[in-house]
Image: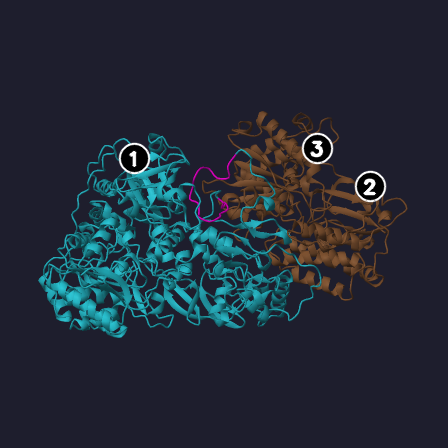
Amino acid sequence: MTLTPVLTDTWDAERSWTLEAYESRGGYDGLRAALGMDPGAVVQAVKDSGLRGRGGAGFPTGMKWGFLPPPDGGPRYLVVNADESEPGTCKDIPLMLASPQHLIEGIVITSYAIGCHHAFIYVRGEVLHVYRRLIKAVEEAYAAGYLGKDVQGSGFDLEVTVHAGAGAYICGEETALLDSLEGLRGQPRLKPPFPAVAGLYARPTVVNNVESIASVPGILARGADWFASMGTERSQGHGLFSLSGHVKRPGQYEAPLGITLRTLLDLAGGVRRGHELKFWTPGGSSTPLFTADHLDTPLDYESVGAAGSMLGTRALQIFDETVCVVRAVSRWTDFYAHESCGKCTPCREGTYWLKQVLHRIEAGQGQDGDLELLLDLCDNILGRAFCALGDGATSPITSSVKLFREEYQAHIDSRGCPFDPVASALFPYTPKTRPAAALAGAGAGGHR
Amino acid sequence: MTVTTPKTGSGPVEKPVDLVTFTVDGIEMSVPKGTLVIRAAEQAGIQIPRFCDHPLLAPAGACRQCLVEVATPDREGNVRPMPKPQASCTLEATPGMVVKTQLTSPVADKAQQGVMELLLMNHPLDCPVCDKGGECPLQNQAMTNGRADTRFIDVKRTFPKPIALSTQILLDRERCVLCQRCTRFSEEIAGDAFIALQDRGAGQQIGRFDQSVLGFAEPADEPATPGPVDRPVGEAYPDTSGQPFASYFSGNTVQICPVGALTGAGYRFRSRPFDLVSTPAVGEHDACGSAIRIDHRRGVVLRRLSGDDPLVNEEWITDKDRFAFTWQTAPDRVTTPLVRDVAEDGTKGELRPASWAEALGVAAAGLAAATADGGVGVLPGGRLTVEDAFAWSRFARAVLGTNDVDQRVRVHSLEEEAFLGHAVAGSGVGVTFSDLESAPAVLLVGLEAEEEAGVTFLRLRKGVAKGRVRVFAVAPYASRGLERLSGTLLPAAPGTEAEWLDGLRTRLTGGLLPADAAPAVLDEGIDALAQAGSVILVGERLATSPGAYAAALALAQATGARLAWIPRRAGERGGVEAGLLPGLLPGGRPVVDPAARAEVAAAWGSVPEAPGRDTGEILDALSVGQLGAALVGGVELADLPDPAHARRALSGAGFVVSLEVRLSEAAQLADVVLPVAPPQERAGSYWNWEGRVRAFGQAIESTALPDHRVLHALAAELGADLSAATPQQAHLAIAALGRWAGNRVPAPDGAPAGPPVVGPGLAVLAGWRLLLDDARGQDGERFLAGTAKRALARMSAATAASFDAYDGDAVTVSTDRGSVTVPVAVTDMVDGVVWLPLKSAGCRVHDTLGAAPGDLVRVVPAVPGGPAGQDGEAAAGRSDA
């Protein structure tokens, strides 16, 4: 199985982010094809292609579009979720940096298909360089007549607004994103109503991931069959796999769904020289961990699910045997405690507690029963929280305790961490001793 | 009674309710479609623990305490369990759904226990010193649905102890479980959001506007708030609109807080809930008749809470009804009868305590003498209970033999009396709170709903929020209350209200309109009002506007809209029913109607035929000696349009008897003062503006007597039987009168007077009383006083410029009598008008200016550093009232 560069195909071009470079490689062919079709036929083509949401949940994209109620004369919106923040995930940001026109073409086609005349791109606020590049790309598209009034003489109008978030992981959750976009506090909304019925400004709204939308032009230009010919029976098409961590050549590898980590590792030059794979995440930190036992698990939605994890965002973080799993999981938990929006009790209070227990164990102050406590807390959070953030926070803990229970117990029994953090570092590094106050993580507004 | 009867077919048609049948803990039940599982379970007697859920607030699903296990039928009808426990406060019951609560599902039970443990983990567990301890949903549900001990051995999140959200409300963030009831109340119900969630994760907190939390600084060159706006007397932080926080409803957040995070400054640390005795009662501060609960301990009232009356105030009350109760136990309470010493040469001396026997004897002798010498004027005041009002009315008519009785301690007019007799008295329950919620349009005339009838405002806002109600207001400017009702202003200078009403009616009938009318607004207004179920609400302030009551009646008749009169004081509607107006006998019987007099005389013994004097005329007659004596109830002389004249009249009167709770100005001028009980020390009932009788019981044991018993004793001294010795007897006497089926008072036919001609340096005075002001009913409650709005003078930019005054400048508004100096707030409003609060600290308009709305006043910029008169304190913008 080899790579299938589609979205990444133009990344090596000279000034690949310009409209000129994009058009010279067949850019906007998909749009021209779409504009010649009935909007319903465009939706059908995407349905036929088998494209599933690339943001993590894997919901069929065409079906999502089909959930919109029939037009009532009022506005309908497309919102592109470009708030890529999942630890390990690094696909949308390089895509928007290297080939933003891919996304914009996808937006025009999708908007045409769903009858939207104002689309929004909600970009993670921290990536200023991407924000600038997107704004420039939108300007170029307006100038070339791909956006604005009467797109390419088709009579179809489309405005695109690029909006920078203020730095909250929760705003990757689609309803929190919509609240944030409306200028409200970014916290998830009660569903129903779902965004398809009452989304942005209480109007029918489609929220799609960057990669999903960017995959649409190819489907229109080359046909649904071409797209469906890649991947597995139920996970069709190409996807970006982001390899990071203890791997020789980290980066984005675009391949058909169903590729295995073994193949990807071969392409990436293998694990760090002289080391071996210990554990890895198939789809970012919110997906249960895999080990070397899963090297041959096909990376498609079904197979990964059957193996007890989730394909997620295909963020493959590779950890070799030098890594202390407690330390890694503790850092992820810090992330979730920091990013919990605070709306619901299980996630807000649960992550606060988990963080402290993990820090205790890592610092050698764990107690017998702490592992049972961790697992029980995770049980009290998983499926009890308002949105999936709380669920995601428990995944690394429950899966790592399951896979590496002895390692956790060793921290407790030997009152300290048996690993040398320096050994796992990819660069010269002096570990900081953690001050007692930081352990507590407490005080007014403790999570700063 | 045409004006309050809806047009045929306009009544709400009951739709058949779609029922949903589902199962909770094995109990099959049918509930209306859309019912939340948590509500349905309550009906089955199953209590699911909850914090964020509140029946009057939109579902949030935030606390996750109410998780239950749910299974629903799929397309084939197989009942399949949902993978996760569901929050029952956000889940609507669907056909065939099977719900298992903590009682039958180990999963639900564990989920609830888990959430409870997490909630308690960061909670300070300071129940022994917490106001809420003993009545705390967190405490109670931790007992019923929580673990006995915690597994948390780590470090708790802490916050500095309470922050003051206003002088009234304190927030202890450590105790908060972030259920968002308070923020949802202020957004959804009151619409004056002043607190919001801040920060995130475990650092998330409820907070006021605080740059240190929000992490940004305000621009150095820009003031936090533009110009003078409504600003409380006490320290205030900006609300979400950027204006200083001034809420009249903030006390409700304390009551709905499911933990002890929000506390009232006055009650904090004062008592334990289990030591309190609760008595249901009715708010005495406005005409809404809000259900309240008085909590007292060993004869001392410690707090008041909102009662729960879905038909009237739901579960909300104004801060005034909640916090202003100390007036009833103020140091100037009259506890024994007082009699004025009279020297042998007839000069009057000081009031001295006297026995009831002596005081009643002196009072009876004085009144008897005056009856023979010109007569007695009766001023009972507008705050009486129904029982008292009938006793006063009967005492005046049957004992003193006079129709010189008028309850109105405010601006009043003949037109108003005719209006009340024609359209209000004896009309029963007309427009209701529920009607306001679903009326397609509500027109407010002479009524600022938030300031003058707070709970009515909330109900209107509820209707507006549901998208059902459109509000129109004839007023000089769009108040913040009107803005929060998304209301449409029909801008009117005081005295020109009738023009708008006539304009609307003319528009409907297609008549000729004056050239300066604004047809677009008129079309909008009349289209809305002509819809079935629309309502016109008129306030007592229309008495200053000639022709306005008549025009409101005519408009109601033309459009079919229903009409309701909302006075400010709790007793006024009851007084109208009891005949505490010179031309009106109980039940809307006209004095001039011989049949009406005969009916009343049959019950009461006798009714005088001669027409009576109204309040103004009584005071006039007293001052020139035409009347021999005055019998005065709860009358604040400063509330009268010309207090100086009233003072002269009472001091010059031959003989004055006062029935008072506290030693008021009127009581100090009296020859005999008979103490009466404040509401909390007696039973009684108020007739609220809807026409609903709102009975309440006696909260505090007391030797103080209600008015009707004092009058009964006084009548006995005069040889008459008032049949009001006990509340039961008073009720029987009222019932004995029966309904009046005869002719009503004819409709008023006032003609609008043109607006006064405004010369240079002059402006027309507009104004109304604010909910919280300098009134004696709020005495002794300094925390509440801190949330009253500061006085300011509103005028349009053009008007201000004509006085050479600009936004924020101090101006002096004066008449020949006196002057007040307050800052200018340039407001989008009609030109040539200056608006003042009528009785706020530093701005007592009737008292100082002797002027009423509609009068002309002089306006000049205040001389900086010059003598600002009595009001210098307010002009400087600071007051510690």
B369 is higher (above) or lower (below) than B616: below
Residue A298 left/right relative to B235: right
Front in this rendered view, residue B628 or A170: B628
Q: Colour of chain A?
A: brown
Separation of residues labelled 1 and 3 (CA atoms): 65 Å
A298 is higher (above) or lower (below) than B806: below
Q: Is residue B230 magenta?
A: yes
For mark 2, give the secondary structure. Answer: helix
Q: Residue type at mark 2: give it.
A: Leu
Residue in view at x 44 percent, y 37 percent: B227
The crowding category of the residue bearing disc 3, from other C-alpha atoms within 10 Å (few below 14, some 14 to 19, many at least 20), is: many
Q: Position of residue B677 (x, y in %)?
A: 32, 67
Q: Which mark is residue A98?
A: 3
B795 is higher (above) or lower (below) than A88: above
Can you name the residue that lies furthest to the right here? A274
Q: Which mark is residue A267?
A: 2
The crowding category of the residue bearing disc 1, from other C-alpha atoms within 10 Å (few below 14, some 14 to 19, many at least 20), is: many
Separation of residues labelled 1 and 2 (CA atoms): 83 Å
Front in this rendered view, residue A98 or B678: B678
Q: Of tags 3 and 2, which is closer to the observer?
A: 3
Residue B204 left/right relative to B438: right
Residue named by callout 1: B832
Q: Is residue B2 at least partly visible in the picture?
A: no
Q: Position of residue B218 (x, y in %)?
A: 56, 38
Q: Quadrant of residue B156?
A: bottom right
Separation of residues labelled 3 and 2 (CA atoms): 21 Å
Residue in view at x 46 percent, y 49 percent: B234
Q: Residue type at mark 3: give it.
A: Ala
Q: Is residue A100 magenta?
A: no
Q: Position of residue B183 (x, y in %)?
A: 51, 53
